[in-house]
Image (cartoon, helix red, strand yellow):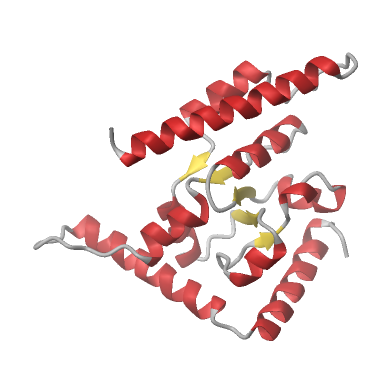
Amino acid sequence: MSDNQNNRISFRVQVSVLLLAFALLAWILPDRQRSAGELTPAEMVSELIEGPQFLPVDQIARSLVNEDNSIQLVDIRQPADFLSANIPGSINIPFEDILNPDWSGYFDDPERFAVVYANGNTLAAEAWMLCTQVGYPGVKIMEGGMNEWFALVMNSEFRGERISTAENARFEMRYRAREYFISMNSLPDSLKTAYLLVKQKKEAELVGGCE
């Protein structure tokens, strides 16, 4: 069995455990009215297995290179991990703070949709479930998270004898995204922190979030 197949099975097992936990929580909590956008555990299983909410890393890299403003990247890792290395254009909202109303503008902005990412898929899937249950529309997951970003964008190289036009375009796009990533993450910590604080303040003013 290939590594990709093993990873997919492992992720499905982890998701199943998470869904069982959600179902148990729903069972022990008092009865309440289910909102229109809230999915049942079975519906969540279907969504996560079919994967329509997953966006490939190459699509994120292309959006970065093309300065696509239709998405908002949301890094749900801890602040220290975010400061160490993050995808340019991301905003840091740690997982435990996702449901804070101050950040709602990043998830229900009608002009763009949020794409959450962590190091892998599991925590991002948890974040997606929370966002889906509270009714945030169109939240997506960057498939594979930072692990996949480093594998495909930062460390990939062509090893064949010939390269097709499509492959050349893909590697060119990855190279440009890599250079942008390196230039932004090579800033001194003081400048990086100042830049991120200014960006966060501007974003919050635009979406009506926290000050």
Which is nearer the eye, 3 or 198?
3
Q: Is residue 47 found left or right of 94 in the rendered image?
A: left
The reply, left or right, for residue 172 in relation to residue 74 is left
Q: Quadrant of the C terminus?
A: bottom right
Q: Is residue 103 above or below residue 90?
A: above
Relative to 31, residue 141 above or below = below
Instruction: Report how many numbered discs are placed on residues in the image.
Output: 0
Task: Tell me the residue at 90%/16% (across/down).
Answer: 30
Which residue of the protein is positioned furthest toward the left in this rendering? 161
Q: Residue at x 55, y 53 (%)?
A: 119
What residue is drawn where x is 61% and y is 56%? 73
Query: In the image, is 164 to the left or to the right of 115?
Result: left
In this view of the protein, which residue sits in the foreground, 178 or 36?
A: 178
In this view, 83 is above or below 99: below
Give 153 or 200, whichever is nearer the viewer.
153
Position in image of residue 162 (x %, y %): 10, 61
Residue 15: image location, x then y, percent: 57, 30
Q: Residue at x 54, y 37 (%)?
A: 53
Q: Position of residue 157 (x, y in %)?
A: 26, 65
Whole-percent x, y for residue 7 in the image: 41, 38
Where, quadrant-wise, is the N terminus in this rendering?
top left
